[in-house]
Image: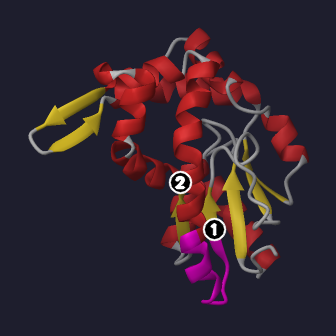
């Protein structure tokens, strides 16, 4: 059964999911952040990562072990097969943690949001039936990623192509929050969406 109070926030790389989550958080809403969970789980999954990708992707630092995030990112964001291997390690663990936190928030009886960037691409989340897509058109996504990550057009296009098309996501959303202008307009669009659901 789907969460009565739970909403998924998704979109594409560069669409502004994090900005929307920050606005919601600032307005007092609870956010479950899949990227944050992923970062926490990445280092904890170092044994699996070293087995699959090799020891050159880990740093042993005394008693602690960390992942070489940039090196691993360079590998997986340039090769869909390698990305799939990493996701096979992380996604079941990420989903378990999202659902654990959702169970707690569901009982508070007010809207909460799970920021799940790869909602349409990966692990199925039947527990959520209210999907919010943060939307920006394809060309704007490319421009934003080039600027934010200091990437070439080719690199940015590749990163966008690793995800499902933004128009597909928009067509399959229950709610769309447009992010095609400035921060003030985005805040207005978020507040308009909140009026719709409250």
Give the structural element (helix, strand or loop) at label 2.
helix
State whether residue 134 is above or below residue 187. Answer: above
Is residue 19 visible from the viewing direction of this image? no
Residue 94 location (% of width, % of height): 54, 54
Residue 75 location (% of width, % of height): 47, 18
| Quarter of the image with the C terminus in it | bottom right
**Which residue is drawn at the image coordinates 42% and 22% (left, top)?**
53
* Crowding at mark 2 (Cα within 10 Å: few <14, some 14-19, many 20+): some
Residue 125 location (% of width, % of height): 74, 58
Q: Earlier in the sequence, mark 2 or mark 1?
A: 2
Q: Which residue is mark 1?
A: 113
**Residue closest to the eye, 188 or 198:** 198
State whether residue 126 is above or below residue 27. Answer: above
- Is residue 107 one of those drawn in magenta? yes
- Which numbered circle lies on residue 93? 2
| Quarter of the image with the N terminus in it | bottom right
State whether residue 180 is above or below residue 143. Answer: below
**Which residue is drawn at the image coordinates 54% and 72% (left, top)?**
101
Which dot, 2 or 1, sits closer to the camera? 2
Give the structural element (helix, strand or loop) at label 1.
strand
**Which residue is drawn at the image coordinates 55% and 15% (left, top)?**
78
- Which numbered circle lies on residue 31? none
Location of residue 69 (image quadrant): top left
**Residue closest to the eye, 186 or 119:** 119
Q: Which residues are magenta?
A: 100-112
Q: In the shown orientation, is residue 180 left or right of residue 37?
A: right
Residue at the outermost front position:
51
Residue 165 location (% of width, % of height): 79, 31
**Which residue is drawn at the image coordinates 26% and 38% (left, top)?**
66
Give the distance between the C-alpha atoms of the residues marked 2 and 1, in whole angstroms.
19 Å
- Is residue 97 one of those drawn in magenta? no
Location of residue 128 (image quadrant): bottom right
């Amino acid at each position: 059964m789907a969460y009565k109070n739970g909403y998924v926030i998704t979109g594409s790389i560069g669409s502004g999911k994090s900005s929307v989550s920050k606005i919601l958080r600032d307005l007092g809403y609870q956010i479950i952040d899949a990227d944050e969970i992923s970062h926490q789980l990445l280092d904890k999954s170092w044994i699996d990562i070293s087995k699959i990708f090799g020891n050159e992707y880990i740093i042993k630092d005394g008693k602690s072990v960390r992942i070489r995030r940039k090196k691993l990112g360079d590998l997986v964001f340039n090769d869909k097969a390698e990305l799939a291997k990493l996701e096979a390690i992380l996604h079941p663990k990420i989903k378990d943690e999202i659902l654990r936190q959702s169970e707690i928030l569901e009982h508070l009886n007010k809207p909460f949001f799970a920021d799940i960037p790869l909602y349409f691409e990966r692990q199925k989340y039947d527990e959520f039936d209210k999907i919010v897509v943060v939307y920006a058109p394809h060309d704007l996504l490319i421009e934003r990623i080039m600027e934010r990550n200091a990437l070439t057009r080719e690199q940015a296009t590749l990163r966008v192509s690793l995800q499902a098309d933004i128009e597909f996501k928009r067509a399959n959303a229950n709610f769309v929050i447009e992010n095609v202008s400035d921060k003030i307009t985005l805040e207005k669009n978020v507040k308009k969406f909140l009026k719709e659901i409250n």
